Image: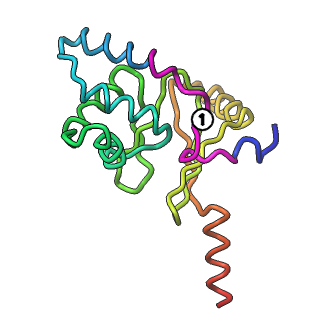
Amino acid sequence: MTHADHDSRSSRARGHDRPQDAGTSAAALAAYIEQKGLKHSRQRERIAQAFFALRGHVTVEELVGHARRDDPRVSVATVYRTMKLLVECGLASARQFGDGQTRYEPSAGRAHHDHLICTGCGDIIEFANEKIESLQETVARRHGFEVESHKLELYGRCARCRKAVRGEERA
């Protein structure tokens, strides 16, 4: 695969891999809720459905807006609690990309990936690169270190933002 193949997937447009089936995710969440002794709620279910439908790096505010289309009574607190449950049961990952907001992305059924974050427009691009993964393992072994998990985030400006800046400089 070429560099462009790996780096051209915007998380706002589509996810890195096919997400876990929504029915499987709903069943996993229901089982977790039952295991925790919590009650089942339609709002939680709607919030989870909205989250998996959005796919990408979603803020609570974005999720509230989407969930309220189906049920205007969905509260911000219920969304936060639901996302906490999704993270606890392994269906979602909470991420911080330096802008002060927690963003959530589906995690079940997805391969590891890293992120390019544009400091201009905020776009988040997912990518996977076997050479980077191999190099990280080599460095860890060399230091007698066993990697349990990692996150690679590269911050800079996307091509669109760099082009916009160049256009402003000419004006």
When the figure is inspected, residue 123 is found, relative to residue 30, above or below; the finding is: below
Does the magenta run of residues contain 38? no
> Which residue does the image show at 28% across and 43% down from the upper left?
68
Image location of residue 165, percent across then percent down: 62, 77
Q: Position of residue 133 (x, y in %)?
A: 67, 32
How far across and down, in percent of the image, does residue 113 sit? 60, 35
Q: Which residues are magenta?
A: 8-23
Drawn side of residue 86 relative to residue 14, left or right: left
Crowdedness near tag 1: few (<14), some (14–19) or many (≥20) residues, C-alpha within 10 Å: some
**Residue found farthest to the front:** 70
Residue under the point 65% across and 70% down: 162
Type of the residue with mark 1: His
In the picture as drawn, the residue positioned furthest to the right comes out as: 2
Residue 78, relative to residue 123: is it above or below? above
Main secondary structure found in the magenta portion? loop
The image quadrant where one finds the N terminus is: top right
Q: Give above or below for 33 relative to 91.
A: above
Residue position marked by numbered label 1 in the rendering: 113
| Identity of the residue drawn at 44% across and 31% down | 52
Image-quadrant location for residue 67: top left
| Image coords of residue 123 (percent x, y) | 54, 55
Quadrant housing residue 156:
bottom right
Mark 1 residue element: loop
Residue 76 falls in which quadrant of the image? top left
User: Viewer-proximal residue, 142 or 115?
Assistant: 115
Q: Nearer the viewer, residue 163 or 130?
A: 163
Asked whether 68 or 57 is in front, the reply is 68
- Colouring chosen for the image of the structure: rainbow
Q: How many numbered discs? A: 1
Name the residue rendered at 32%, 47% in the picture: 65
